[in-house]
Structures are given as C-alpha cells and as structure tokens.
Amino acid sequence: MKISDILEKPCVRILSFLYEKGEVRYTKLAEMIPSRGTLSLNLRQLEQEGLVQRNIVTTKPIHALYSLTEKGEKVAGHLEEVRKVLRK
C-alpha cells in the first residue's frame, strides 16, 4: 500500500477537511463522503480517539457541528505535512 492511499481513507479525509475548514455541519462532511454509514462510523471512531468533537446545536433546526480537538489539530497538521512532502 502506498502512503498516498492512506491519505485517501475516509477518516484521514475528514481530519484534513476539518483542519482546512474548521467547524462544519454534518451535511458538509456528507458532501465529501456520500456514504452516511461510512461517515457516521468514521466520525464515531474519530470521536472515540479524541480527535474530533461534536457539538449539538439545539436551535431549530437541530444540527451537529464537528471540529477538531487540540489532539486532532496536531494529527491533522502532521498529515498535511506528509501531503506536502509527497507533492514535491
């Protein structure tokens, strides 16, 4: 397996997207990863690892916002450095 293949895994794509965009709604993530099952599973795993946090906004309509934790910022930053090296 190539390193560049790892960077295309859903969990890595989510981390990179949040690193670039900051806090986003679930629907924005769903545009990037169309399989809701895959998206939900990966978000849950990233939350369990302490890399992503979910904030439920109770105003109408109720929605979830996702962002990186401090630990997630560090990991995503390192992943971005790997991307830059591979582009050269």
Image (cartoon, grey):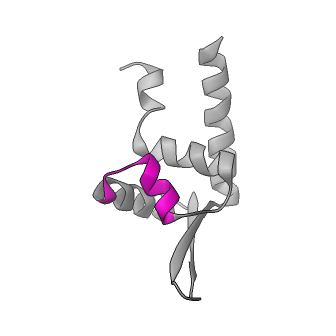
Whether 85 is among the magenta residues is: no
Of 38 and 79, the residue lying toward us: 38
23 left or right of 13 in image: right
Q: Is residue 60 above or below residue 50?
A: below
> What secondary structure do most residues of the magenta stretch adopt?
helix
Q: Position of residue 75 (x, y in %)?
A: 63, 44
| Residue lying at 41% horizontally and 44% vertically, measured from the top left | 10
Q: Quadrant of residue 25?
A: bottom right
Q: Position of residue 57 (x, y in %)?
A: 59, 82
Q: How many marks?
A: 0
Q: Is residue 11 above or below residue 86?
A: below
21 left or right of 15 in image: right
Q: Position of residue 59 (x, y in %)?
A: 59, 88
Q: Quadrant of the C terminus?
A: top right
| Residue lying at 66% horizontally and 55% vertically, measured from the top left | 71
| Residue lying at 47% horizontally and 22% vertically, measured from the top left | 3
Residue reaching furthest to the front = 60
13 left or right of 84 in image: left
Magenta segment, which residues?
26-36
Whether 29 is among the magenta residues is: yes
| Residue lying at 38% horizontally and 56% vertically, measured from the top left | 39
Q: Quadrant of the N terminus?
A: top left
61 left or right of 2 in image: right
